[in-house]
Image: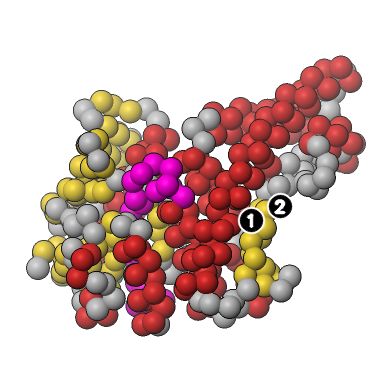
Amino acid sequence: MAIEALMLQGLRNLAQVSIVPSSGVNLIYGLNGSGKTSLLESIYYLAYCKSFRTHKHKNLIQHDQSQFTAFCKLHSGNSRHQLGIERTVNGERRIKLNGEWMQSAAELAQLLPVQLLDPSMLKLLEGSPQLRREYLDWGVFHVEHDFISLWRQFKKAHQTRNALLRSGGHCSEAERSIWHASLASLAEQLNVMRKEYIKRLKPCFDKYIEQLNPNLNVTMSFYQGWSKDRNYLDVLNESWESDLKQGFTQLGPQRADLRLKVNNQPAIEVLSRGQQKMVVCALKLAQAEIYQQQSSSPCIFLVDDLSAELDINHRKALCTLLESLKCQVFVTAVEDTQMTDCWSVSSQLKKFHVEHGTLNQE
Ligand SMILES: Nc1ncnc2c1ncn2[C@@H]1O[C@H](COP(=O)(O)OP(=O)(O)O)[C@@H](O)[C@H]1O
Ligand SMILES: [Mg+2]
C-alpha cells in the first residue's frame, strides 16, 4: 500500500498541506521545529488513529483551530482507497473510509501498514513487555485474519476471570471449570498463532540483523506467558489459589514477551545503543518483509531523525534494505544532504522542504 496523496489541515504548526508523495522515498527536510515530525505524525495517525508522541489528541490540533483533518488516497495494485480522519477540540472523532463513516479504527491498521523508526525506538527493547507484545501482535494481526476476534474474546474471558478473582472467587467448582476451559482454549489458539508467526519472523530477523550489523549474535526467543511444556488449562486450575491471593491472573498470553539476547544476556544490557537500534531496525524490517509476503504489498516506513540516530554506514545499510523491500518511505532530516546519498537513483526520491510549517516540493 502506498500513499498517493496526502492532505492536512489544522495539524500542529503545519499550514495546509496537499502533497503527492513518491511511492518510493520522500525526504522531508527542514530546521528544528519546522514541522517534519508533525508530518510523519499525521500519517501515523491515519494508520492507528493515535499519535506516537502523545495520548492527548487535542495536542495535535493547531492552537487557534477547533479541529484537524487528515486525508489520504491509498493505492495498491488494483485497489484504491480514500481515508479521512477529523478530530475536534471537543474530543469528537470522525473517520471516513471510501465515503462511508466508520465506527471503529481497527480496520485502519489493516489498510495502512505503517512502521515507525524514530528516536524513541529503543523503547521496544528497554520498555515493558507490553510494547513487544504489541509489536508481535501487529504482525500476527496482519497474517492471521481471525486473530483480532480471537484476541477480543480472550481479553473478555481474561477480564471476567480477573473480576471474579478480585471479588473473592465465589463460584462453584463446576462453574469454574467451564470458565477455565473456555479461557484456556482461547489462550492456546492465540498462542499457536503467535508461535507460528515467530517461526516466520525469526529467520527474517536473523537475516536483517546480519546485514545491518554482522556478528552481533542476537537471538530471538518467545516467552508465551507460562511454562512452555505446560498446557494452559492445568496452569489456570493450579494457580487458582495463588491468583486469588494476588487478585489477578498471573500467567497467560497477557504476560507473553519477545526476548532478545546476546550470549544469554538481555541485548539491552550488552549491546551499545547504536547496536540496539540496529536490532530494532531488523525487527521492523523483518515484520515488513513478512507483511509483504502475506499481502503482496509493501509497508510504509516513517523514519524520523535518522541522521541523529545512526552513523552514515548504518544509515546507508538501512536505506538499502528499505529500498530492496520497495517500501514507501517518509524520512526526515535537518539538511537534505544528510540523507540524499543514502538512496540509489531508482528510489524515485522526492524532496520536500519544510519551513515554519509550510511544505514545498523541490
Ligand atoms: N498544537 C500545535 N499548534 C501549533 N503549533 C504546534 C502545536 N504542537 C506543536 N507545535 C509546534 O510545531 C512545531 C513543529 O514541531 P515538529 O513537527 O516536532 O518539528 P520538527 O520535527 O521539524 O523539529 C514546533 O515548533 C512546535 O512548537
Ligand atoms: Mg522532529
Residue linked to disc 2: 223
Left or right of residue 65: residue 46: right
Write the start and end of the magenta stretch as one range: 290-310
Residue 335: percent from left, percent from top: 23, 79
Left or right of residue 139: residue 45: left
Amino acid under disc 2: Tyr
> Residue 258 shows which numbered tag?
1
Above or below, 50 relative to 209: above
The residue at 22%/36% (across/down) is 78
Q: Earlier in the sequence, mark 2 or mark 1?
A: 2
Q: Quadrant of residue 271?
A: bottom right
Quadrant containing the N terminus in the rendered view: top left
Above or below, 210 relative to 170: below
Q: Is mark 1 within 8 Å of ligand 2?
A: no
Say how the picture is coloured.
secondary structure
Residue 15: percent from left, percent from top: 15, 57
Mark 2–mark 1 CB contact (< 8 Å): yes
